[in-house]
Amino acid sequence: MYVRSLYMTGDPAKVDGFAETVRTKGFEMLSPQPGFRGMGVFADRELGKLLVGSWWEDEASRQASDEALSSRRSEMMAPFAQTMTIDNWEAPVARRAEGLGPEACFRLVRMDVDPTDVDLLVDTFRDTSLPKAEKVPGLAGISLLVDRAHGRAAVGALYRDADALASSRGTIAAIRGESETKARATTRSLEEFAVVMATAVPHG
């Protein structure tokens, strides 16, 4: 699986309205594209941040969709996005949740890793971190994304509600520290969002 992420900042007062636009019109724009496999929309209403992730069956589908939709996407984002960063990722490990309730929350951790250590990070996450994280109460889904060429990675984790998110922080911090030590990775940032939308499209 492959992912394209859009990270936007803008007026906090406009977050809810724009997030609804992305949830509806954005999904309608993406869903007919070949290889589309799902979408997540995550909001920080207090600071005015919006994170949008689209999932793709293969790298070619992700690239083709970007070429087909980039101008329409820019037009849609313009009313809100004062800044926007677009990143492309491979998703070697993905445990995606479906049917999340309205109280669901999301944590995003960005990491730096030497490009030669990306496979070590993937193996460490899959074999060590994931089994431990899946035992954390309230965890609903978790994925590891990597950018091999630039030595970057991100872990996104979905939780049933804000209480589960908050109570997980200490345990997950310990798991993250162990994983990063083994994989020689370093945390660059840690952010938490409310879940506006998280949906997966079945194959076929």
Image (cartoon, rainbow, N blue to C red):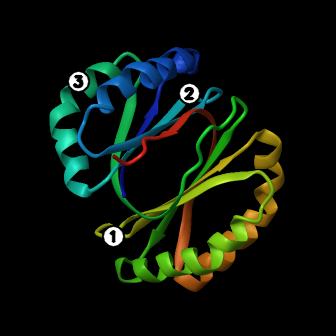
Give the image location of residue 97, x and y in percent: 59, 48
In the depicted structure, whether residue 175 falls above or below residue 78: below
Q: Amino acid at mark 2?
A: Gly
Mark 3 closeness class: few <14, some 14–19, many ≥20 residues within 10 Å: few
Pick whichever of labels 1 and 3 is earlier in the sequence.
Answer: 3
The number of numbered discs placed on residues in the rendered structure image is 3
Say which amino acid is labelled 1: Arg
Which tag, 2 or 1, sits closer to the chain's start?
2
Question: As rendered, which of 36 and 204 lies closer to the eye?
Answer: 204
Q: Which residue is mark 3?
A: 72
Q: CA distance from mark 1 to mark 3?
A: 28 Å
Q: Nearer the viewer, mark 3 or mark 2?
A: 3
Residue 177 image offset from top left, x and y in percent: 67, 74
Q: Secondary structure at mark 1?
A: loop
Residue at 42% in and 41% down: 201
Q: Residue at x 72, y 72 (%)?
A: 132
Residue denoted by label 2: 48
User: What residue would you read off at disc 1?
Assistant: 148
Is residue 11 at all visible to an observer of this figure? no
Name, please, the residue furthest toward the front: 204
Alpha carbon separation for disc pair 2 and 1: 30 Å
In-image side of 17 versus 54 (left or right): right
Residue 66: percent from the left, percent from the top?
22, 40
Please report the residue visible at 17 percent of the width from the left and 44 percent of the height from the top.
64
Residue 173, located in which quarter of the rendered image? bottom right
Q: Quadrant of residue 31?
A: top left
With 25 as the anchor, is 106 left or right in this view?
right
Q: Residues within 10 Å of mark 1 (few under 14, many from 20)?
A: some
Marks 2 and 1: which is nearer the front? 1
The reply to whether the C-beta atoms of the residues labelled 3 and 2 are less than 8 Å apart is: no
